[in-house]
Image (cartoon, grey):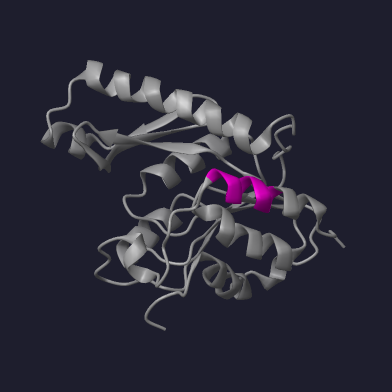
């Protein structure tokens, strides 16, 4: 397999490595929105597990927003890429300004995706943390750091694709990591999908709603 057709197909392939978690009442699938949600929906559906979002925002370098100098997550959790901050000589006030804007977007998405639905109880749960791939790792690291404060029983990363060394590094931070495609030369997440069109808010909301309506037994 050279590429995934799309995020839905990637989720269907990924869940084949997670079958030991089918019908387990202590499992919850958490997606990093937006791109992780279509992948996670397929996993939650097959495992008959609840699906929710765990919102993380990348902190983009000013003038180079695709490059992550860090990330923030629920509960004011943050991680920083010191090498990037040093290389681009990013001043503290610029970092704080980006964080302020991204906190607003994090709160907006929290309201848009969850609305009045309460945040799930994660203590003593097996968390399957899903994204459509890992590039810099900033968002995933922020999510892991934040999730650990909820004291889950286990954290499992499940992603369709990530660079081989990134997988090895991430595996040290969690209890398990599932990643079927581990290229030595990565480039970008989108390079490993035939269709990597942007996931919109409406699709996220719709899939979360559908997941809540799925039978759990």
114 part of magenta stretch:
no
Residue in the picture at 85% in, 60% down? 215
- In screen coordinates, is 146 left or right of 126? left
Hey, which quadrant is residue 133 in on the image?
bottom left
Q: Residue furthest bottom?
A: 1
Name which residue lies at 25% across and 63% down. Answer: 187
Q: Residue furthest top?
A: 93
Say whether residue 191 is visible: yes
Q: Judge whether residue 163 can be spotted in this image.
A: no
Dividing the picture into quarters, in which one does residue 128 lie?
A: bottom right
Q: Quadrant of the C terminus?
A: bottom right
Residue at figure coordinates x 37%, y 34% from the top left = 79
Q: Residue at x 30, y 60 (%)?
A: 188
Q: Taking 136 as reference, is 4 left or right?
A: right
Q: Quadrant of the N terminus?
A: bottom left
Image height check: is 15 above or below 199? Answer: below
User: In the image, is 129 to the left or to the right of 140?
Assistant: right
Q: Which quadrant of the structure image shows residue 181?
A: bottom left
201 and 65: which one is in front?
Answer: 201
In this rendering, is residue 20 above or below 69?
A: below
Give residue 211's position: percent from left, percent from top.
Answer: 73, 54
Q: Position of residue 88 (x, y in %)?
A: 13, 34
**Helix, strand or loop for the magenta stretch, by majority:** helix
Who is closer to the viewer here, 54 or 154? 54
Work out whether 173 lies above or below 158: above
- In the image, residue 110 lies at what x, y percent? 59, 32
Residue 196: x %, y % from top left:
41, 63
Q: Which residues are magenta?
A: 201-208
């Amino acid at each position: 397999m050279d590429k995934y057709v799309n995020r839905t197909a990637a989720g269907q392939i990924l869940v084949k490595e997670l079958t030991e978690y089918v019908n387990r009442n202590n499992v919850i699938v958490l997606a990093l929105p937006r791109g992780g949600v279509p992948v996670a929906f397929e996993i939650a559906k097959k495992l008959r597990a609840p699906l929710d979002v765990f919102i993380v925002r990348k902190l983009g370098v000013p003038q180079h927003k695709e490059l992550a100098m860090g990330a923030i997550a629920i509960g004011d959790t943050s991680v920083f890429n010191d090498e990037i901050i040093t290389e681009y000589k990013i001043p503290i006030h610029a970092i704080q300004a980006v964080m302020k804007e991204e906190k607003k977007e994090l709160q907006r998405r929290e309201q848009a995706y969850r609305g009045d639905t309460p945040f799930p109880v994660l203590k003593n749960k097996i968390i399957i943390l899903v994204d459509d791939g890992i590039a810099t790792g900033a968002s995933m690291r922020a999510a892991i750091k934040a999730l650990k404060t909820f004291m889950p029983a286990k954290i499992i990363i499940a992603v369709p694709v990530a660079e081989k060394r990134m997988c090895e590094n991430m595996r040290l931070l969690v209890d398990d990591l599932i990643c079927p495609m581990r290229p030595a030369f990565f480039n970008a997440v989108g390079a490993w999908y035939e269709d990597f069109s942007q996931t919109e808010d409406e699709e996220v909301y719709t899939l979360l709603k559908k997941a809540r309506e799925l039978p759990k037994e």
